[in-house]
Image (spheres, helix red, strand yellow):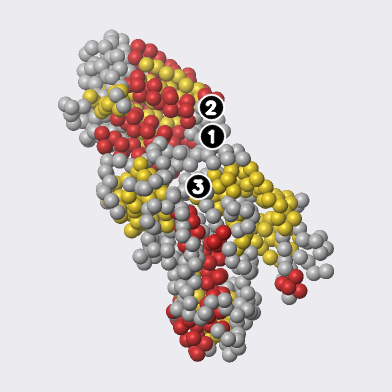
Amino acid sequence: MAGRLYALLVGIDAYPSPIPPLSGCVNDVDGMAGLLRERVGDAALELAVLTDAEATRAAVAATCARHLGRAGPEDVALFYYSGHGSQQATPEELWDLEPDHRNETLVCVDSRTEGSWDLADKELAGLLHDIASTGCHTLVVLDCCHAGDGTRDADDVVRLAPPDPRPRPASTFLGLFPASGDGPGEAARATRSGRWTPAGRHVLLAACRSSETAKEVTVQGRQRGALSAALEAAVLDTDGRPSYRDVLRLVTADVSSRVRDQHPQVETADATELDRPFLGGAIPSTPRPLTLSCLPDGWSIDSGAVHGVPAPIGDDTTELAVYPLGGETSGSPLATAAVTKVLPDRSIVTLTASLDPAFVYRAVVTSIPLEPVLVGVVGDSAGTAALRKAADEADQTLLDLAEGTESAQADLLVEATADGFVITRPGVTRPLVPVVEGDAREERTIRALEQVARWLRLSALANPATRLPDDAVRIEVGSGSGAVRARGTLTVAYAGSAPPRFTVRLANTTTHPLWAALIDLTETYGIFTDAFPAGSVALGPGEATALDLVGQVADALWQAGTVSLRDQLMVVTSTIEFDPRSLEQEELDVSAAPSVSPGATRSADTPAVTSNLERALSGTRTRRLGPSTGTAAVADWRTDSVFVVTNRPRL
């Protein structure tokens, strides 16, 4: 966030008779103030607090206008209220704004004294209308009852004051009538009937539905509002900036586990605000976990198709390990889960062990389904039949030979000729390799296809549920001609016969230790992992490392007419140490005799995996790994790539 957070926190326990006193509202304000100081920081926070006797109607209205009114277009304004809510009769002059003729109100400490009134929804709406008109992002949090027809529970303390029986003159409503007294003013016209906020770019988080009451509960020996305690936990227990959808999901699960008949609500005039970070981005970005919770249609994780979670491929699906939300991901998980259905915003899962549906859990991806590479086979019938027979004896988790019209959608194409096999990629005119001919050519062609398949799967590998930020490890690849970052392309060129040099710099931008590996995927389908002696390098918070590399177009390729090659430099970032060196493979070359006997499978040498990341990396080579055991270490990880084009002009 470029600007500042202006927050007004109001909490009232000490109500005078006949309003029932409360016990947790000041605790709520203290908790929220501590949360803002910890997650936003004093340097970006402008905080005003009114509690008990300070929280008069006049003080709340004046502080709201004066303090929150300072927020500009780059800022965030927060109005937070913890106390009693109530209702009152609407003056006849305002019936057009309130069809049921009842105002929803906040009960200030002096609201029921002579000459004072509750703060009505329309008054607060008018104040917020003026604040939001500056262009700031505005959030309203109300931990109170905001309707009078809720079901009361004798075992709970409810934040619902009795309605004010006094008839209230319309002239006492702040800002609703212009000085002339002729009809409602601009603030009133901006309000929406029955809402606490006017139409605009702001969000309301309410403790309950309009037909329910807000409850107080005991949390760690202190009275708290059920919503406030859940909101504090939701923000503190997530490492990143949760969206308003995320917050609603988390607080609903927490509140439902503590009290009955209370369902928090998020309301906004603009649905796109729901996907905005909580508090409009005032909380700095750090990783947050993938969560698992039980909803009416079953257990689900909060990532779906729009987040990149792949649909199950036959029996192969996304697998997860489940841990306590605020706990570590070391040791055995509470349960494991498997995705059975991918929805747009979340994914339905099945569990291997029973979990308490009242709680939200942390889930970490341990395995990702990877589709076999589709290969179209055309040409000589005898040759195609022989190739299919060789493929049947190979690793079918890597290759799927297309039938008939499927060849049009194939990732690779093999043409059987009288001389041998020609391998191409759709859209690429030149063959990937020379014609594969001679002895054992069918097996050698399958080996070449498997090598390309491993390269293709690794080059596209991504973690759909990572909570590491985009620049967790910042990548910068540069030379004398400039520099690029993740997803960029750097072009370098030979100077005569001298190959060009460039530098790769990796920097940990987080406050946690990370491990990084640099994998070079060459255009000729080689995979090289020797950038670091141990495969990956440890980077402490703020620590950086640099590598000096050379771009090359091999003499043999250059002499054959190739003057430009593109390398994909993939950086794999992990929260635990890992070793990618089992991925290594030489440049594609099928001219030599096969190193394994025809018909042998190529999965027996797959090394044992020690983490979910190494399992995902190994999955690009073969899916013959079996189900995950739940005993491997669990990391959060991500992949990012930079492309380097090396030009070697003809002399």
Q: Residue 527: which quarter of the image?
A: bottom right
Quarter of the rendering occupied by the C terminus: bottom right
Taking 344 as reference, is 512 above or below it? Answer: above
Q: Amino acid at mark 2?
A: Ala
x%, y% of residue 143? 32, 27
Tell me residue 188's x, y (percent): 38, 27
Inspect the image, locate mark 3, and give the three-letter code of the amino acid beneath it. Answer: Ile
Q: Secondary structure at mark 1?
A: loop
Q: CA distance from mark 3 to mark 1?
A: 30 Å
At label 3, counting other C-alpha atoms closer than 10 Å, the crowd grade (few under 14, some 14-19, many 20 or more) is some
Lower position in the chain sequence, tag 2 or tag 3: 2
Seen in the picture, residue 171 relative to 302 is either above or below; the reply is above
Give the image location of residue 500, x and y in percent.
76, 58
Towards the viewer: 340 or 188: 340
**Foreground mark, 3 or 1?**
3
Q: Which residue is mark 3?
A: 576
Could you classify mark 2 by the number of other residues whose Cα lies within 10 Å: few (under 14), some (14-19), or many (20 or more)?
some
- Check whether the beta carbons of the residues at disc 2 and disc 1 lie within 8 A of each other: yes
| Secondary structure category for the residue under label 2 | helix
Q: Residue at x 34, y 29 (%)?
A: 228
Q: Residue at x 62, y 82 (%)?
A: 435
Tag 1: amino acid: Met
Sequence-wise first label, 2 or 1: 1
Point 62% across, 53% down: residue: 533
| Residue 374 in view, yes or no | no
List the residue tagged with mark 2: 44
Q: Determine if residue 583 is in view.
A: yes
Q: Earlier in the sequence, mark 3 or mark 1?
A: 1
Residue marked by disc 1 = 1
> Could you tell whether 271 is left or right of 145 in the image?
right
* CA separation in Å, label 2 and label 1: 9 Å
